[in-house]
Amino acid sequence: MDTPQKHIPPERKAIYYGGMALSVVGLLLFLSTFVTFLANFGNFDNFEGRARSEGFRAFGGIVLIMIGGSVMGVGLRGWAGSGLVLDPEKARRDVEPWSRMGGGIVQDALSEIDVVNRIGTPAEPAAPQVKVRCRECQALNDEAARFCNQCGSAI
């Protein structure tokens, strides 16, 4: 089996940052719609053309934001980790840095809980207890008992 991956490959980093760039461009396109609306507030010259242009920019911006988010997901988790390639072994390798990080976070949280820390440490051995059997009913009693706690006869 392959050794666990300790870093993110440069190709995946490039895909991730490319998706981030697409998202930023989409956000700027979407927000530019509001700027042009405010700049032309009350101006009805070529209203239909401007409205069509703003609509396309807003819709195109939203589409670019969604595509950028999907591309970022592929860069983040890899082709198999994001579900685009159905290969469980490759998916496990793709998401290994995040699963290792998640396990580290859980381990850090558990290390702060006193009960969990005591579970891992060996308990002190209990002192041996001596019991005395009653001659009448055969019940076990403490060593210091003078009478049977089952039948009440003298020990």
Image: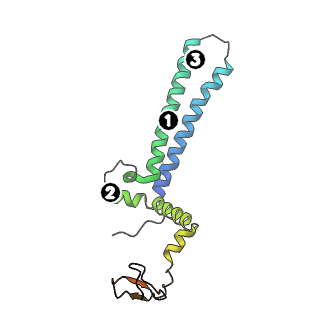
Q: Which residue is mark 1?
A: 64
Residue displayed at 51% across by 78% down: 121
Secondary structure category for the residue under label 1: helix
Q: Earlier in the sequence, mark 1 or mark 3?
A: 3
**Sequence-first tag of 2 and 3:** 3
- Residue 133 x/y as whole percent: 37, 87
Q: Marks 1 and 3: which is nearer the front?
A: 1
Q: Secondary structure at mark 3?
A: helix
Q: Going 41% across and 80% down the picture, which residue do you hit?
A: 152
Q: Between marks 1 and 2, how big is the CA–CA gap?
A: 30 Å
Q: Secondary structure at mark 2?
A: helix
Percent across and percent down for residue 138 are: 33, 84
Q: Which colour scheme appears in the figure?
A: rainbow
Q: Tell me the crowding category of disc 2: few under 14, some 14 to 19, or many 20 or more residues within 10 angstroms, Cα based.
A: few
The residue singled out by tag 3 in the image is: 50
Q: Residue furthest front?
A: 153
Residue 147 drawn at (x, y percent): 44, 84
Disc marking residue 88? 2
Of the numbered discs 1 and 2, the one sitting upstream in the chain is: 1
Q: Is residue 70 above or below residue 63?
A: below
- 45 with respect to 22 (left or right): right
The amino acid pointed to by label 1 is Leu
Q: Give the spatial CA distance, label 1 vs label 3.
A: 21 Å
Q: Residue at x 50, y 54 (%)?
A: 13
